[in-house]
Image (spheres, rainbow, N blue to C red):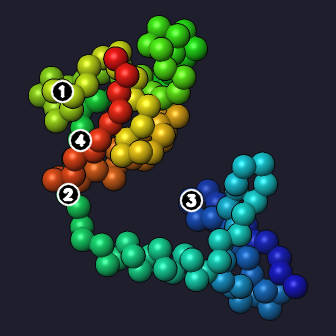
Amino acid sequence: MFTIAQRDVHLGIPPYLRRDTGSQAGGVVAPYDTGLAVVPARTLLAAAERLLEAPQKVPVDLGIEVDRLTPRLAGAAGAETGVVVTWVNPAGVAAEMLRVGDVIQAVDGMSMTTPEAWRVRAARVGVGDIPNPCPRT
């Protein structure tokens, strides 16, 4: 029998499954959609190994800020989904590619439906990477 234990949630450490004896059952319980999902330890360890073996990237600032695409902006841009570019650093790496008012619908085939999705993707860009945004201007 397993129980869900909450531990140090305020520190960002997720709850985990454990056996009644107190030993970890080898998984993490995380919020997903409207319920909870269990990620097996094997999956977590494999992902951690891949991250540890991957070469370190030097992060790069793309020099843009985005915001949620409102229905009014979507209508004006002719886009159904995406994020709208609200600021572009003229000296930034994206200055030649994007301008304020552009709607980024996808990057490298990955839909950009929220500013959070953009921030996650942008955080993974390193020096030498060439992200391929699909803007609609």
Q: Badge 3 local density, few (<14 within 10 Å), some, or many (20+)?
A: few
Secondary structure at badge 1 equals loop
Q: Badge 4 local density, few (<14 within 10 Å), some, or many (20+)?
A: some
- Disc 3 marks which residue? 12
Which callout, 1 or 3, points to the residue nearer the camera? 1
Find the distance from the CA under tag 4 to the CA under tag 3.
25 Å
- Of pointers 1 and 2, the one earlier in the residue sequence: 2
| Residue 16 picture location, percent across and down | 69, 72
Secondary structure at badge 4 equals loop
For the residues labelled 1 and 2, say whether their Cβ atoms are less than 8 Å apart.
Answer: no
Find the distance from the CA under tag 1 to the CA under tag 4.
12 Å
- Front-lying residue, 129 or 34: 129
**In the depicted structure, whether residue 134 falls above or below residue 31:** above
| Kind of residue at disc 3 | Gly
For the residues labelled 3 and 2, say whether their Cβ atoms are less than 8 Å apart.
Answer: no
Which callout, 1 or 2, points to the residue nearer the camera? 1
| Residue 100 picture location, percent across and down | 30, 17
- Disc 4 marks which residue? 61
Secondary structure at badge 2 equals loop
Q: Residue at x 83, y 81 (%)?
A: 2
- Disc 2 marks which residue? 58
Residue 102 visible in the displayed image: yes
- Disc 1 marks which residue? 95
Find the distance from the CA under tag 1 to the CA under tag 3.
35 Å
Find the distance from the CA under tag 1 to the CA under tag 2.
20 Å
Residue 66 visible in the displayed image: no
Q: Is residue 82 left or right of residue 87?
A: right
| Kind of residue at disc 2 | Val
Quarter holding the C terminus? top left
| Kind of residue at disc 1 | Ala
Find the distance from the CA under tag 3 to the CA under tag 2.
25 Å
Which callout, 1 or 4, points to the residue nearer the camera? 1
